[in-house]
Amino acid sequence: MRLASTALAATTLVAALVALPAARAAEAPPQGVLGLQASASAEVAQDLLSVTFSTSRDGPEAAAVQSALKQAVDAALAEARRAARPGQLEVRSGNFSMFPRHSPKGGITGWQGSAEVVVEGRDIAAISQLAGRIQSLTIARVAWGLSREQREKAEADLAAQAIATYRAKAAAYAKQFGYADVVIREVQIMGSEPPPFVPVMARAKTMAMADESLPVEAGKANVTVTVSGSVQMTR
């Protein structure tokens, strides 16, 4: 029994020693692998407009300040809702804040508050006209952005360009290294994610501008698609 056990142990040891080089070979990095990336970019016309209206109030009583803010916001919302259409012109309330005013000795001497209403969508003409009809708030910010549909369409076109460039670069580099062809090993396609809206300069609308449309002009946003990964060069 002892001889059999010794023989079995010796056989196991020999098998392990034989398998070790094979395991090391399997762990060795593959040869002829090329990593690279390619990108395609384009400037796309912005088709989303966002206008933020705001107002502020102050007074000795918090309740009175809050009530005045509510009245101003309600008037703006009522006007905006008459023009609202899903996806084209949407309206929502924005920030609403109240802060106490303190005396040098630390006591509360009054209250300050501010409130916002946000109008955004793809109907640029309707939004600019609505801006002239809202009189209880003033324009605080104007921003442009890309709709999801516009971005996805641009990314689909750019992805095709980036993939074609990626394949051409892979084939060209492989030939320079003395290989005949390439096989895709792994690949990732990533699109850029810019902020949804980019602020632009806007003049505040006063009562003198009532019933005037907001002068706006769309800009362009840069959209980029990047293809990256690795290919196996073959003889």
Image (cartoon, helix red, strand yellow):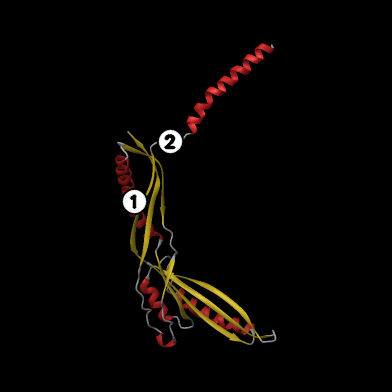
Side of 75 relative to 97 (left or right): left
Residue 80 percent coordinates (x, y): 45, 75
Residue at 41 percent of width and 88 percent of height: 208
Q: Which of these two is toward me, 126 or 139?
A: 139
Location of residue 45 (image quadrant) = bottom left
Q: Are marks 2 and 1 in contact (CB under 8 Å)?
A: no
Side of 180 relative to 10 (left or right): left
- First in sequence: mark 2 vs mark 1: 2
Q: Amino acid at mark 1?
A: Ala
Where 104 falls versus 88 (above or below)? below
Residue 46 percent coordinates (x, y): 36, 66
What element does badge 2 sit on?
A: loop
Neighbor class of circle 1 (other Cα within 10 Å; few <14, some 14-19, many 20+) is many
Residue at 37 percent of width and 71 percent of height: 124
Q: Which residue is mark 2?
A: 30
Q: Which residue is mark 1?
A: 162
What element does badge 1 sit on?
A: helix
Location of residue 153 (image quadrant) = bottom left
